[in-house]
Image (cartoon, rainbow, N blue to C red):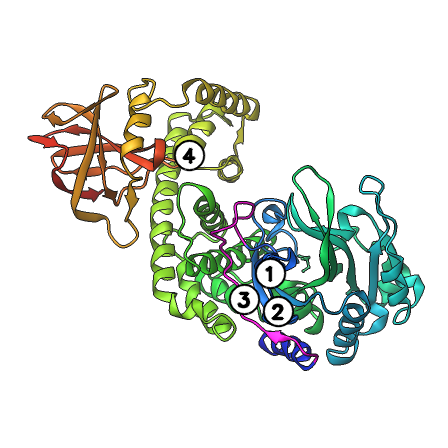
Amino acid sequence: MMTANEIRESYKRFFEEHGHLIVPSAPMVIKDDPTLMFTNAGMNQFKDIILGHTEPKCRRMTDSQKCLRVSGKHNDLEEVGHDTYHHTMFEMLGNWSFGDYFKKEAIAFAWEYLTEVVKIDKDKLYVTVFGGDESDQQGPDMEAYDFWKAHIDESRIIYGNKKDNFWEMGETGPCGPCSEIHIDLRDAQRRAQISGRELVNKDDPEVIEIWNLVFIQYNRLANGSLVELPEKHVDTGMGFERLCRALQGKTSNYDTDVFQPLIQELAKMSGIAYGKDKKCDIAMRVIADHCRAVSFAISDGQLPSNNGAGYVIRRVLRRAIRYGFTFLHFEAPFVYKLLPILVEQMQHNFPEIKTQQELVGKVIYEEETAFLRTLAQGIRRFEAYIEQNQGVHTIDGGFAFELFDTYGFPIDLTREIAGAAGHSVDMDAFDAAMEAQRERARATANRDAWGKANNVWVALSDGLPATEFDGYDHDELTGCEVVAIVRDGESVREAKTGDQVEIVLDRTPFYGEMGGQVGDTGIVGPARVTNTLHHEGGLVGHVAEVTDGAVSVGDRVTAVVD
Ligand code: SER
């Protein structure tokens, strides 16, 4: 049986033999494209070539691209872990023709690789071609149909709609009709009962798409119209983890050697075997998947944070932590412990994961520590509530909302914990509290710790750069400069003992309140910090009472998180 690493190599070699230049994966994090946060397809790095803005180094290329689908047009997050074949981060094996070969050769290459190189049984394969779309004034892709006919029986060629057979990178950008290859991985008996043809694109977990051949010939403009590109291109993408599953004869991507080493480590760490309990299995799959996504994002320079791409990564990591905490009973950081296994598996094709290993491990560990602390506080709050409300079997929705709002407990987690203790949650009241908070948020947008309209922050952000967050390596920073002090909604130069203020530093180790997570508390110079808030322009305010002496703008102070 071929290992995952051998399968990846065989793909790249096959296309190299057919004149393709092997190129490295582009970073998964995209910094210079306002339409995309993360690489969601192998072709992203070639967008400028496809649009005719740059010349390619070679007209044929191939690679294995690390992709992330957790936001935007292609978003698989909620499925991940619950089914057997969706992932946040996955590898896309691709071959490209930039103005070189088109449909005929792309189809012939794909067929030869699948049926002759890795020897997939032809009887398990089906293909789809674009059936046309009136709104775009496009007819069916008869060319692709006819090229397929040379390889596969017509009963295995299926017309598909625009959703499945017209590929678009995003709302705008390169696009064109596509032809997908689907594989039927059911056992012979079930295949004899119902034809795989009936199950293509029907969400059957065993009849799945493995390869998408896109024939790019248009650019979709912001007004929705299609413009012909100067040249025609081929962009193919094959799900590497799905191919591994097919070639290794497994019923789940998670049973391949891509995921099993991570899952087995989780089983060892938790003392719970994989495959014994549905919920624990889902948790292990979620963690194995998310650990990859987060590690690769950080190694590409995207740290978890409170906004934009950083917030997406923080959410993914917190989802993993919550699953581990709830179902595998991990109370101390655990995700970072998987990193050495991941590095071992992936460093051959993605050397950056090895060179960044130390940073990635540290960042994940810090995030886990902070979030587990919040979760633990929430659990204690929950236990106190149960203690105080003996005999009550329905948890007050307002209280469930407090857990969500203050401790970052998603309602599912609260219901889970409540259920385990024999309680239910008043969901109507929870929904009402959530709606009321949305109303409040709308009404008080742009207010500060004193509830005053925050024009002061707008004004401050004009002259000050965003506060730099520097809390990954330390809970304590010395020599931070006080760049602003806000008291009663006004910017002041100095604050004295007893004053309630917000202190802004040039850099801080404090995490700010966001997305239900409470802000950090601690000490800043002579002041006691009770919360940390985000403001206009990335400024961070340390809500504090000066307890001992005075603090002035320009002072250098020490900041220590509790
Ligand atoms: N761009 C296509 C996809 O993502 C093929 O690579 O499916």
Q: CA distance from mark 1 to mark 2?
A: 30 Å
Dot 2 corresponds to which residue?
256
Mark 4 burial class by Cα count in 10 Å: few <14, some 14-19, many 20+: some
Residue visible at 74% across and 80% down in the picture: 117
Residue 205 x %, y %? 73, 56
Give the mark, 3 or 4, whose residue is nearer the N terminus: 3
Dot 3 corresponds to which residue?
25
Mark 3 burial class by Cα count in 10 Å: few <14, some 14-19, many 20+: some
Q: Pointers 2 and 4 in contact (CB under 8 A)?
A: no
Front-most of 362 and 112? 112
The nearer-to-camera label among 3 and 1 is 1
Give the SS element for disc 4.
loop
- The amino acid pointed to by label 3 is Ser
Give the SS element for disc 2.
loop
- The amino acid pointed to by label 2 is Thr
Residue 452 x %, y %? 31, 17
Question: In the drawing, what numbered circle is on residue 516?
Answer: 4
Residue visible at 90% across and 60% down in the picture: 193
Residue visible at 17% across and 27% down in the picture: 545
Q: Quadrant of the C terminus?
A: top left
Q: Quadrant of residue 68?
A: bottom right
Ligand 1 lies under 8 Å from the Cβ of mark 4: no
301 versus 443 height, above or below: below
